[in-house]
Amino acid sequence: MTKDLEEVHAPGKRSLALLSILLFGASLMAGSGRAQDSTQQPQTESNYQPPTYPGQIEKDDGEWLRPAKDYASTRYSSLDQITRANAKDLKVVATFSTGLTKGEEAAPLVIGDTLYVITPFPNKLYALDLGKPGFPLKWTYDPLPTPASQGEACCDVVNRGGSYYDGKIFYNTLDDQTVSVDAKTGREVWKVRVGDINRGETLTMAPLVVKGKVLVGISGGEMGVRGWLEALDAKDGKLIWRAYSTGPDKDVLIGPNFKPFYAKDRGQDLGVKTWPPDAWRIGGGSVWGWISYDADLNLIYYGTSNPGPWNAAARPGDNKWTAGIFARNPDTGEAVWYYQYSPHDTYDYDGVNENVLVDLKINNQVRKVILHPDRNGYVYVIDRTNGQVIEANPFVPITTSTGVNLQTGQLQYVADKATITGKVVRDLCPTAPGAKDWQPSAFSPRTGLLYIPHNNLCMDKEDLAVNYIAGTPYVGANVRMYNAPGGYGGAFTAWDPITGKIVWNDPDMFPVWSGALATAGDVVFYGTMEGWFKAVDANTGKVLWQFKTGSGVIGQPVTFKAPDGKQYVAVLAGVGGWSGAIVSGALDPRDTSAALGFAGVMKDLPKYTAPGGTLYVFALP
Amino acid sequence: MYSPSRSAILVVVATVIGMTSSCARETRILQPPPPGQATLNSVQVSGINPGAYPLPPPPPPNIYEESAYSVSQGQTLFQEYNCSGCHANGGGGMGPPLMDNNWIYGSEPQNIFATIMEGRPNGMPSFRNRIPEYQAWEIVGYVRSLAGLLPSDLSAARTDEMNVKPNPTPSQKPVGITGNPE
């Protein structure tokens, strides 16, 4: 090519200068994102027209009782006092410091005249009085978790929130205890230990209460745990059922009613047979994400984490039932269907992201579906009655796979990107934290759009030999990450789930690690790791208002109506989490493998924000 | 007065000294001292001495950080015992970074030995009865090399693995007994 250029432009200083500019430009483009060979690129659409929503949204009482607002996990509130026209007038009305320097990922809960804040380790529960000016502190509950548990949490000592049911607040502590606290008095009703930190088990997820059962899942996919979800009796904390994510069918609660849609998920004891002998005992499949519930179908939905260790050479096979989604009967725990997003995952593509239950008109037929933006880079539209994948479209650049075969349900991996022990494999997109990590999206029935906070990263990965030592990480990989094509680290994206295309996209220099909140005022809220809390137009993404909080925002915004009848918006600021561990853990980014490979690409974050947890509550004047 | 022979002697002496020191770098400790000889707890973690008493004498050196071989063994063991699982290649993750020379529980070899053997309350496991003492001292040497506390000719060379961190660079030495608590 160089030669051709020289021949066209006869030798001369001017053409050489031109040539060098061209080459420089080319190198700049290559430098802005090394993964230019992505096999999948998200598509965009213009002239989006919101369809009429054919489904029903759970009746809204202006409170926030559950992690994701409703059982369908929409994170949509029908409150509409804050609109696109007046959002610019939002002001801080109250703040509350947690006094902690770890990542604040929890959604505040609001029940009646009280707002509840659940903190990262040491997992205190604060009750604030919404009936008085400034929302003063009513009481504090301290579960006193053991400090040693901090050494067992893979990615900062976060907590993702709690649930309200029957006069109690239910939530988890890092040291494996589920607690029930009287919502009025702050008195402990019960506290049960469900796991063991000496096996690498911790609790970070927000439990969901369904039909009097507290659903709790274990964390530790990087620690060689054997994942499970269990149901505790809300009255006394007694175990009702536990469903493992690996092992024999009787442990996974697979019985005669288990009817997966795809042939690849059928067979006896696949949770044993798709592993080398006994590898399933330390194979991951933890349940640290979100749970959704469809009362009509009487099914709960949740995802399982990556298989362990990250070095996949240690576990040939599909590694069921990791990196997939289970539908279960909440009464008995028995599995009804399962689908595996990333069989034999080699990139840490957990399947734990939120499952948003909506009804969509697809090909003139209203279907009960799950919207699931997965770490592997696709937004899945799944029939929630039977587990059929209706669509799977990329929402970020992808190099590790070429698509999902809708006939077989199989993710089509790229052979060149398979990881090998002792070899550095480059330009893997998305990365270990995925196209999107835990940060939950929101759905607005008014716009028909799914609002997805996510990452835009690629990685190099080298698998290493790894020993299993109980209570220590079981990973076996060196990873370093960098920004994906586009040159930015994350984005907030409005997604049309019917066409599978991006309607609008708001890039940010860092991963957008906060949750999303959609409201009937057509205002959508989210925060950035730099610390900007934003209200944007649900239709266009235009920033209507933003406020700079004291630390990066990785929490989940909520909205509620206080006893005074006004609409409020609340969010916890306080940077941390896996992406923010460089600040909350004061890591040294000269080692690009720090924080499981996340530190290198986040090396500038300490220049923008400092740690510190604070609740902010906003309202119109 | 200039004397060629005297100058030649100087050169020979310098060469011998140089050879001796570079040989020490290669020393291998074939017979570890019996366990329990460690001067555990003889190093205080606090820099405050009530009553303004003088600081205690400096602790004995860690013989396992006087040879590049031992430090290199420490590097291997740092991976094998999964120290890297939490501390990465020195930059930290689940555990604090080790290459930033900011020591919560002290930078002296005995402090780090105690950290490995006894654990620390906020998540550091105790490896007592799981790691032979001499191997723990080798890991101590490697950990201190990450922070640039060892001479550069003793620090472990980079591995064949993905280059994820710069070669150890001498960083600012902590002042007093320990660095800053977090």
Image: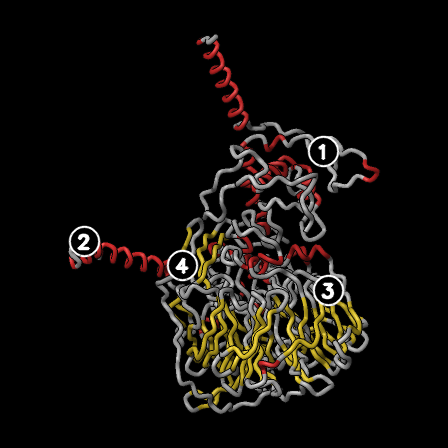
Q: Are marks 2 and 4 in contact (CB under 8 Å)?
A: no
Q: Is residue A54 above or below residue A307?
A: below
Q: Is residue A130 left or right of residue B160?
A: right
| Circle nearer the viewer, 2 or 4 | 2
Secondary structure under badge 1?
Answer: loop
> Where does label 1 land, which residue?
B39
| Circle nearer the viewer, 3 or 4 | 4
> Where does label 2 land, which residue?
A12
Do the residues marked 2 and 4 share a common chain?
yes
Picture mark count: 4
In the image, what residue type sits under mark 3?
Arg
> Where does label 4 land, which residue?
A427
In x, y percent, where is residue A274?
Answer: 49, 63
> Where does label 3 land, which residue?
A193
In the image, what residue type sits under mark 4?
Asp
Q: Earlier in the sequence, mark 2 or mark 4?
A: 2
Q: Is residue A346 above or below residue A84?
A: above
In x, y percent, where is residue A3?
Answer: 19, 54
Q: Are marks 2 and 3 in contact (CB under 8 Å)?
A: no
Q: Tell me how far mark 1 sits from mark 2, CA to CA.
A: 75 Å
Location of residue A178 by image quarter: bottom right
Using a 10 Å C-alpha cutoff, classify the residue at mark 1 as few (fewer than 14 neighbours), some (14 to 19) or many (20 or more): some
Secondary structure under badge 3?
Answer: strand
In x, y percent, where is residue B66?
Answer: 58, 30
> Is A549 or B35 nearer to us in this picture?
A549
> Is B75 or B164 nearer to us in this picture?
B164
